[in-house]
Each structure stands twice: as C-alpha cells, then as structure tokens.
Amino acid sequence: MSTSFTITDVESDLGCPGASSYIKVQLNDLSDYPLGVGSLAPVPVVVPAKYQSYAQQVRDFQVYEDDVWIITFPKCGTTWTQEMVWLIDHELDYETARAVSINTRSVFLEIGAIADGIPVDTVSTTAGMKRPRHIKSHLPLPLLARQLWTVKPKIVYVTRNPKDVAVSYLHHYQMIMGFRGTKEAFLNGLVEDRVMFCPQVRHALEFWPLKDSAPNVLFLTYESMKRDLRDVLLRVSEFFAKSYTEDQLNMLAEHLSFDQMKKNPSTNNEQMVRGAMKMNGREGEHFEFMRKGIVGDHRNELSEEYIAKFDRFLEKQLAGSDFKYDE
C-alpha cells in the first residue's frame, strides 16, 4: 500500500455477507487537497477491508473536465439526484432515461471495491467509460480522486438529516448487505461513526465550505428537494448552464416524483435489490429500494432514547460550524 494512506484493521460487530470485515483508511498525502476545506484535515474513514486494494487506484483515478460527479453519504437521495442531474445534463432525454438503467447512465465508482460479492473492478471499468461520464460515489472527500480538485469537473453533493439516514441505512444494511445483527448495534455504530463510509457528519462538513470556494461544486439537501423540487431544478439547471421552460420543468418534476421513480424500472433498482438479496442471504424476503422517501420518518421508527442520542451526537459534531441539517 502506498504511503498516501494509513490503514488500520478494526474490530466490528457490523460484519455481514456484503462486507465481512472493515478497516479505517486515513489520507496522509495532502497534495492537491482542496484549499476551501480549511482546517478540516483528513480523519480515518471506515470502509470494507476489500477497499485496501483500491484506495490508491481511486486516488489516482483520471478525472476529466466533462465528468459529472454525484457524491453523497449513503441513503441521502442519491438515485433521485442521479436521475435529476442526468436528465438536466442530457436535454431531458426521457427516451434514453427510460430505456437504460440509471446505474448504467450514472455508474457507482467503488461498488466493486467495497462489496465482497462483486468480483468486478468497477474502478477500472468506470475509468474506461465513454465520455462524458456521470459518476456516483459515497466516498468522503479525502478518499476521492485527487484530480477532482485540479481538473474541477462538476460535482453535485447531497446531504440528509442523519436521523432519517439512520432508518433508511438500517434497512439497506439488513436487506441489501445481509446484516443480521441487532437494530441497536447498527444505530450505536452510526452515532459512534463505525458504519461504512463514516464519519457521517464529517462527510457533509468537508463539502460545506466548497459551496462558496469552488464554483464547480453544488451543495444540496434532500429536504430542500422534498420541500421545493422546482426550485432545486432551477438551481441545477443553472449550474449546468441549461434553460428549460415551465412546462418542461413541470414534466421533469412529475418524472422525479417519488411515486414515478418507485414504479420506473430504470430508477427503482429492483434488479439490483433482488441480486444483492440473493447474494447476501435475504432471497425471498420483501424489500423495496425506495421505501417511503419521507422527511422526518425517523420519528416513526426510532425510540425517543435514540433520537435524543442522535441529537447529542449532532450537536457535538457540528460545534463550531455554521452548517446545520435540515429537519
């Protein structure tokens, strides 16, 4: 392993068929690190142990100016954002969007580098994609390709209130990754930053300053998309230097509605879900990738004790920052 990173094995009660063991990866090489991040020096990031073989490959990944990157912590409206951004950037080409899966049009860079059951080197296949490329990643800023900060392609970052993320991520870990531990173990893991791609709040804080210092970065929240999608569509269109009529934006908003996305085979990830559940021992059980899409759903699924624990966790993590999560 290159000296770019320090790798540490970690004991975890969150192992599952999708990721049996975990490591912490800390970036040491700060060359090309974005200046706008300020005093937020890299911290160790939890990823599946398989990622050790790919960390340097991702860091050295060749970036092009015409790339579009969608970066989120898991369960922050990633697929929704991918579809929105792809259509706005492709002149609202619904015909292709309906015919070709979102996972083909907007590829998941590191899935083959983190999932035990996926034998494909998705980092290399993404590198060889026909340009212009749309690329999705859940990796935090320190583990991403360093050329992002020198080549400066368009980057759309989306965050979501961690309490709602907790509920959605728990279901994902159980059904997609095959986790069979307790709900309490997983939730404790989140507030202790021991779950894959954690630390969670830091994930957002590293991108927050770039909204002002990096014109190629657009920072969005899941809650703002739910609250006023039309306004977000205008912002994203402007970011991509596109102009659409009121009727076009109305049609796009309808296409991107939760009900439409959920029943659209190109966006509902039904095939991916079935394949992952079969691979990870959940075959035959019922699970939908797009479950509810509700802001504040944590109130229905988390105990008052855990909500209070998350609130204390967030208060501590956000101390000294002007960033606040939407509710």
Image: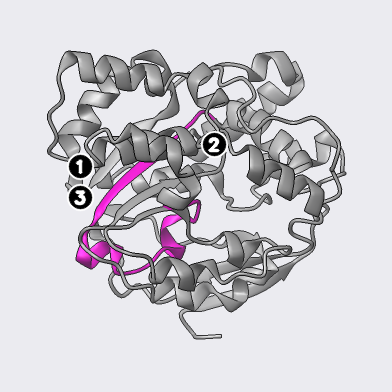
Circle 2 — which element?
Answer: helix
* Above or below for 252 versus 7: above
Circle 1 — which element?
Answer: helix
Circle 3 — which element?
Answer: loop
Disc 3 packing (10 Å; few <14; some 14–19; many ≥20):
some
Q: In the image, what residue occupies the spot 44% across and 27% down?
A: 222
Q: In the image, what residue occupies the spot 26% across and 33% down?
A: 92
* Above or below for 208 versus 44: above
Distance of label 3 from label 1 (alpha carbons): 6 Å
Residue 91 disc label: none
Query: For the residue marked with disc 1, what is the amino acid?
Result: Asp
Disc with the residue nearer the chain's start (3 vs 2): 3
Provide residue 254's location: percent of width, then percent of height: 38, 16
> Do the numbered discs 3 and 1 sit on residues whose CB atoms are within 8 Å?
yes
- Judging by the rendered image, the residue that carries numbered circle 1 is 212
Residue 316 disc label: 2
Residue 214 disc label: 3
Disc with the residue nearer the chain's start (2 vs 1): 1
